[in-house]
Amino acid sequence: MANRFGLWLRNRFPELDPVLLATLGVLSLVGLATLYSAASDHPGRFGEQLRNYGHDLFPAIRISNRLTLQR
């Protein structure tokens, strides 16, 4: 299953480095788990952090697409 996901990811986003993307994913999941356990009394913080990840991820993909197209 991991092979299929890796191939799908490489076909969908050929400009992204898979090792870097996996590292960022693991660090993000660890950060989200830590935030979830630490901010259980403030549930809005978890949603805000997810929103922040979205605000960071989509521009990064768009910028990497533009840099790849310029080559």
Image (cartoon, helix red, strand yellow):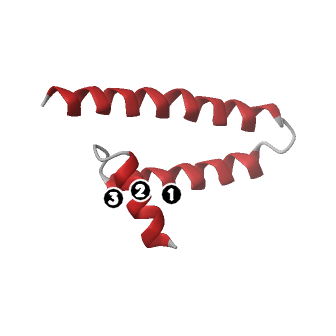
Q: Where is residue 62 drawn, in percent x and y?
A: 38, 28
Numbered disc in front, either 3 or 1: 3
Q: Are marks 3 and 2 in contact (CB under 8 Å)?
A: yes
Residue bearing the label numbered 2: 23
Amino acid, disc 1: Val
Where 41 falls versus 4 (above or below)?
A: above
Is residue 57 or residue 47 the one in the foreground? Answer: 57
Q: Secondary structure at mark 3?
A: helix
In the image, taking residue 17 as reference, residue 52 lies left or right, namely right
Q: Quadrant of residue 67?
A: top left
Q: Residue at x 65, y 36 (%)?
A: 50
Q: Quadrant of residue 70?
A: top left
Q: Which mark is residue 26?
A: 1
Q: Residue at x 69, y 46 (%)?
A: 35
Residue bearing the label numbered 3: 19
Residue at mark 2 to residue at mark 1: CA–CA distance:
5 Å
Q: Residue at x 73, y 38 (%)?
A: 46
